[in-house]
Amino acid sequence: MSDDFADQDVIRRLLNESRTWAFVGLGDNPEREVHTQARLLQERGKRIIPVHPAAREVLGEKGYASLAAVPDASGVDVVGVYRRAEHAGQAVDEAIAAGAKAVWLPLQVIDEAAARRAKDAGLDVVMDRCPAVEWALRR
């Protein structure tokens, strides 16, 4: 994987300066890693937006069936893509279309072509990194 998608300055900026994270794949199952990551960032002052086909409320926030359904999705700072790698490209393309500012693909979610499309569209991209681990490294 290219280091283009693990730039420490980008990671630091996204963790420190972002306010709103949409989590693609965030459902109401607290056993899923996406739930843990969303809760952690919410506890650190980030607004979270659950994006899941079931569109349920999660962690006290209204859920949406897709990024396209999120009102003013262009206000989303980071889209966390918690889908299997073979589905990540579609979520990245939706983030680009929605006008999000960045995409974050967590550990073992690697799609270099999708990451390149996002970067070429002007989004910041982090791939194969865990927000919790990166947060801990910066404190």
Image (cartoon, grey):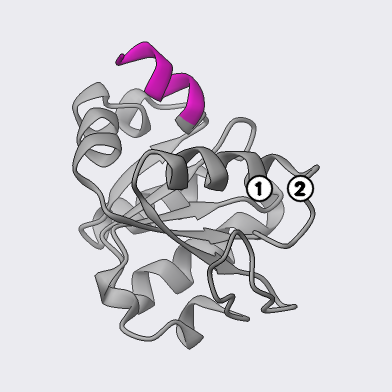
The picture places residue 96, in percent across and down from the top left corner, at: 35, 69
Q: Is residue 135 above or below residue 115?
A: above
Is residue 8 rendered to the left or right of residue 130?
Answer: left
Foreground: 79 or 62? 62
Q: Is residue 134 magenta?
A: yes
- Tell me the number on the disc at residue 30: 2
Tag 2, which secondary structure?
A: loop
> Label 2 amino acid?
Pro
Q: Which residue is mark 1?
A: 35
Residue 65: image x %, image y %?
A: 63, 81
Question: Residue 7 or 65: which is nearer the viewer?
Answer: 65
When asked about the image quadrant of residue 101, the answer is bottom left
* Range shown magenta: 132-139
Residue 28 lies, with reference to residue 97, above or below; the image says: above
Residue nearest the viewer, comparing 28 with 137: 28
Is residue 91 visible in the rendered image? The answer is yes
Find out whether the residues at labels 2 and 1 contact each other: C-beta distance under 8 Å.
yes
